[in-house]
């Protein structure tokens, strides 16, 4: 069996040949495995970058995930999109590796501090580029970054995160809160102009509201 | 479970960026690395340097050759029985030619048959006529009918052990005489004390034909016993990506096991061991971070807190370390400070060691001997538990919290080590001996393993062996 891989049209090609590739992977054919890897490595690598500290660790996560994919490929029934299934397997493998750290973190970092105002967090992130946001997430401690990723980018609820990581829901909330607070501090330090822009915008908005309310 | 919808624009941007084709890709050659990792584990384990196999084959061949060509230790060292002497060299001076053998076989004291002249018999006295009845007597009484309590040689050592050069008389050692005497291997057990008598240093010293004194315990071919070893090793990790320790990692622990020894001649021996134990790999790290007031966050109770993160590369694990240090917020710091942080990582491993040594013994006294050994040792290290990590200090700042979480980078590894040993062997009794020795190891080649593997492994160990000889 031979495979032709065209990078520009890989998605269309995979959709047509998906069953053939899966069958090749089930037989352990290295060519089919390579084709599957080449098709999905980009998005999944960038997903792993969010959870990893550096590119080396991200590549390790990616490789561990694909090894699991190749081991479990027989379980794929073709009921959903192959890409979504591969992503789910890679993410679960990655989370399994990170779970131990979060357990320890959950024991040591129970919520013990007074809540602070982090409502301006989303506005702070708006003017920052994607790569800069990724760098900020990577700088977070592992536990913070893990919960942050799962909550905002995988759109998991705190209950789901708690179940995935084996921690309490309260710990998940605490981690997210601290992650946001740390991110805010980092943004303010790294991008003071962004903070100033947000502050000036809010000030201008408040002034306009005040002016309109007082009919000046 | 209902999923929340964050609906954050920045999150949507990030997700879109992940799907973009122009976004970063894994480094080139990533598929080759993945394919290499997917190779069967057995193939990767077998990647020992070829010279190790050739060395092992050569050593094994030499040992086997030596084993098969070396003389029998007892036969070569001492004439163990007067009967053997008769068969080989002739009769002793103060006994008639066949009488000693016949006496032994009959279980009689020499005095009972001392009718023969005690001086060296002339060749005329050794006639076929005189020897035939004795032979007949020997053949008749040779079966194990001799009473066990009568041990003539043991009770009269001087009469039987005064050995003289062989008497040149073809009649005294006819071929059928020699064949009539059972070989040493078939000697009845009750004759064994005579061997012990022959091995007495005084007796052996009086006989110039004997080799130097050999302790009786050395006559046993096999020995087995427990071993206990305290190891102190030094090793350097390679292929690390995180923070490396400030000095070589120290591996220390205790091993216990069994050793089996086979004597090869008077001085040489081969010893195979197998021991298991637990050892701890300790790594000490020191790193610097810049502490600036801008990075601080002030809590409500007046503490200024700062966070630092570092990845520590242990031998078997990689440890993400997050350190939170604090200081009183009301004490301002001017310029950024250089913060010196020290940490220690301890990994517990289970070790299995199989040493194969060729040893040489040199007697230093009646009971003591020097033992030198050389050989190879196979070691397997397997990480046993989660490592322990602790923060030692962070300058003058108070360590508020520290979190060290490790992930295993290397589950187990196998090493081939060259081993040299020197020790003292002290004989405790007729069967037991105790050996204290110092072993020095150095790794042969590099370890074929993932990141964090040992590329240089050296160590020493103090070993105690208690051997039972049989």
Image (cartoon, coloured by chain):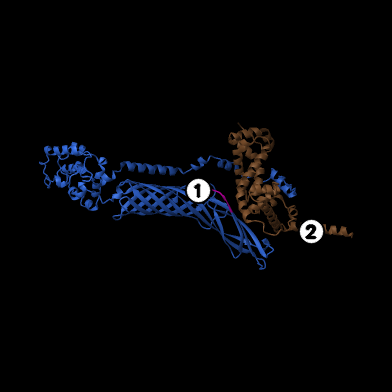
Chain colours: A brown, B blue
Name the outermost residue toward the right.
A215
What residue do we see at 77% from left, 58% from top?
A: A199
Q: Report whether residue A83 is seen.
A: yes
Q: Nearer the viewer, mark 1 or mark 2?
A: 1
Work out whether B468 lies above or below B171: below
Q: Secondary structure at mark 2?
A: helix
Badge 2 sits on which subunit?
A
Labels in figure, total: 2
Report the residue marked by disc 1. B382
Q: Main secondary structure of the magenta part?
A: strand
Side of B119 where B11 appears, left or right? right
Q: Secondary structure at mark 1?
A: strand
The spot of residue B342 in percent (x, y) is 56, 60
Work out whether A147 lies above or below B140: below
Give a yes or no on whether discs 1 and 2 share a subunit. no
Name the outermost residue toward the top.
A1
The spot of residue B185 in percent (x, y) is 27, 41
Whether the magenta-drawn stretch holds residue B409 is answered as yes
Side of A16 where B208 appears, left or right? left
The residue closer to the viewer here, B361 or B6, is B6
Whether the magenta-drawn stretch holds residue B214 is answered as no
Which segment did they paint magenta?
Answer: B405-410
Report the residue marked by disc 2. A200
Q: Report whether residue B266 is seen.
A: no
Mark-to-mark CA distance, 1 and 2: 60 Å
């Amino acid at each position: 069996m031979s495979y032709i891989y065209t990078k520009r049209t890989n998605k269309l090609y995979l959709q047509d040949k998906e069953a053939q590739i899966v069958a090749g992977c089930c037989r352990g054919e290295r060519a089919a495995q390579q084709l599957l890897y080449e098709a999905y490595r980009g998005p999944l690598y960038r997903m792993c970058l969010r959870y990893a500290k550096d590119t080396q660790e991200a590549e390790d996560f990616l490789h561990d995930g694909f090894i699991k994919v190749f081991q479990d490929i027989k379980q794929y029934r073709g009921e959903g999109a192959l890409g979504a299934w591969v992503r789910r397997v890679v993410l679960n493998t990655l989370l399994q590796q990170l779970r131990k750290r979060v357990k320890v973190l959950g024991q040591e970092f129970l919520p013990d501090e007074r809540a602070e105002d982090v409502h301006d967090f989303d506005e702070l992130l708006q003017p920052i580029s994607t790569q800069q946001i990724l760098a900020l997430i990577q700088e977070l401690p592992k536990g913070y970054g893990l919960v942050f990723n799962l909550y905002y980018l995988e759109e998991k609820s705190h209950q789901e995160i708690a179940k995935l990581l084996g921690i309490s829901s309260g710990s998940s909330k605490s981690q997210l809160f601290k992650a946001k607070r740390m991110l805010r501090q980092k943004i303010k330090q790294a991008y003071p102009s962004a903070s100033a822009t947000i502050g000036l915008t809010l000030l201008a908005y408040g002034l306009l509201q005040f002016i309109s309310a007082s009919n000046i | 479970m209902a999923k929340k919808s964050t609906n954050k624009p920045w999150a949507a941007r990030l997700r879109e960026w992940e799907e973009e084709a122009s976004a970063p890709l894994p480094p080139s050659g990533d598929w080759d690395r993945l394919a290499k990792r997917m190779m069967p584990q057995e193939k990767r384990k077998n990647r020992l340097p070829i010279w190790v196999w050739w060395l092992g084959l050569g050593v094994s061949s030499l040992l086997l050759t030596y084993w098969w060509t070396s003389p029998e230790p007892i036969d070569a060292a001492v004439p163990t029985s007067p009967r053997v002497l008769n068969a080989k060299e002739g009769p002793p001076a103060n006994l008639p030619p066949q009488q000693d053998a016949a006496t032994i076989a009959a279980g009689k004291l020499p005095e009972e048959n001392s009718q023969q002249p005690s001086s060296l018999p002339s060749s005329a006295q050794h006639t076929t006529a005189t020897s035939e009845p004795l032979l007949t007597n020997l053949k008749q009484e040779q079966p194990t009918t001799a009473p066990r309590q009568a041990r003539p040689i043991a009770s009269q050592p001087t009469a039987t052990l005064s050995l003289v050069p062989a008497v040149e008389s073809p009649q005294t050692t006819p071929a059928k005489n020699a064949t009539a005497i059972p070989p040493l291997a078939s000697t009845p057990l009750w004759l064994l004390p005579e061997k012990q008598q022959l091995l007495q240093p005084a007796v052996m010293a009086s006989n110039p034909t004997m080799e130097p004194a050999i302790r009786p315990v050395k006559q046993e071919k096999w020995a087995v016993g427990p071993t206990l070893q305290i190891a102190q090793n030094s090793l350097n990790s390679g292929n690390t990506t995180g923070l490396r320790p400030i000095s070589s990692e120290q591996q220390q622990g205790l091993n216990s096991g069994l050793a089996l020894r086979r004597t090869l001649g008077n001085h040489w021996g081969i010893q195979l061991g197998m021991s298991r134990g637990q050892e701890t790999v300790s790594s000490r790290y020191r790193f610097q971070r810049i502490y600036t007031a801008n990075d601080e966050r002030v809590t409500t109770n007046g503490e200024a807190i700062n966070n630092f993160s570092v990845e520590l590369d242990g031998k078997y694990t990689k440890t993400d370390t997050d350190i939170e240090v604090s200081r009183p917020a009301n004490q301002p710091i001017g310029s950024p400070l250089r913060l010196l942080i020290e940490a220690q990582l301890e990994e517990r491993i289970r070790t299995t060691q199989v040493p194969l040594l060729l040893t040489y013994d040199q007697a230093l006294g009646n009971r003591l001997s020097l033992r030198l050994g050389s050989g190879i040792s196979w070691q397997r290290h397997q990480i046993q538990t989660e490592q322990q990590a602790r923060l030692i200090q962070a300058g003058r700042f108070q360590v508020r919290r520290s979190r060290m979480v490790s992930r295993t980078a290397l589950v187990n590894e196998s090493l081939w080590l060259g081993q040299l040993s020197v020790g003292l062997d002290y004989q405790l009794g007729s069967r037991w001996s105790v050996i204290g020795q110092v072993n020095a190891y150095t790794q042969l080649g590099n370890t074929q393993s993932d990141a964090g593997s040992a590329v240089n492994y050296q160590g020493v160990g103090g070993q105690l062996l208690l051997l039972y000889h049989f």
